[in-house]
């Protein structure tokens, strides 16, 4: 579901935030995204070590998804075809959430988006006029826990 709505381009770069155990990472690779064109940012040391072993050719960075300019290093100025996030954004204050979304969207090329996984019935962030819009995917009840993705896009100028 994240890949369908995120629409990553195998010819471009894809950014995955909070990959955890690598379930989405694996699906990205299976869908045709070359490991070398995938940049993953993981905060937790345990998951980072696991991901290094599972995906040795992925550009894996241990760092803070809420500080991408410093975390991304050599990829800080890269324009991504898509940003997919499993970061638990509902646990952070709304203002920081809004800045996170805007930062992610500033890193996508035209036509790209931020696809955010959530287990909430409501959007983790409402649209911000003049900045970005948000749409939701259908609810996936058979997922455990049930969830959906929220698709954030830059507002058209």
Image (spheres, rainbow, N blue to C red):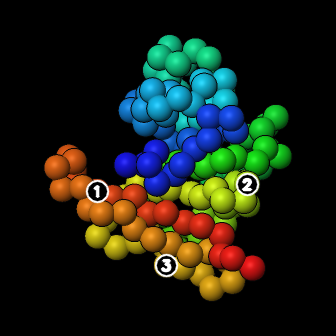
Q: Secondary structure at mark 1?
A: loop
Crowding at dot 3, Cα within 10 Å, few <14 / some 14-19 / many 20+, comes out as some
Residue for badge 2: 109
Q: How many marks?
A: 3
Q: Earlier in the sequence, mark 1 or mark 2?
A: 2
Quarter of the figure with the C terminus: bottom right
Check residue 147 in the rendering and tell me which mark sits there, or answer none: 1
Residue 19 position (above or below residue 34): below
Q: Earlier in the sequence, mark 3 or mark 2?
A: 2
Residue for badge 3: 126
Instruction: Write the residue at 69% across / 83% down.
Output: 130
Q: Secondary structure at mark 3?
A: loop
Residue 87 visible somewhere in the drawing:
no
Q: Secondary structure at mark 2?
A: loop
Residue 1 visible somewhere in the drawing:
yes
Instruction: Write the residue at 69% across / 46% down.
Output: 80
Question: Would you say 59 lies left or right of 94 here?
Answer: right
């Amino acid at each position: 579901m994240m890949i369908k709505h995120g629409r990553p381009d195998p010819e471009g770069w894809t950014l995955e935030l909070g990959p955890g155990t690598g379930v989405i990472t694996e699906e990205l690779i299976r869908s045709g995204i070359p490991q070398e064109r995938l940049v993953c940012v993981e905060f937790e040391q345990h998951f980072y070590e696991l991901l290094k072993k599972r995906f040795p050719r992925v550009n894996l960075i241990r760092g803070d998804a809420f500080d991408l300019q410093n975390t991304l290093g050599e990829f800080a100025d890269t324009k991504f075809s898509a940003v997919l996030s499993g970061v638990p954004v509902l646990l952070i204050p709304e203002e920081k959430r809004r800045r996170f979304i805007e930062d992610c969207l500033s890193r996508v090329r035209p036509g790209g988006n931020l696809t955010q996984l959530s287990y909430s019935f409501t959007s983790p962030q409402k649209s911000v006029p003049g900045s970005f819009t948000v749409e939701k995917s259908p609810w996936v009840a058979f997922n455990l826990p049930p969830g959906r993705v929220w698709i954030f896009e830059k507002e058209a100028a």
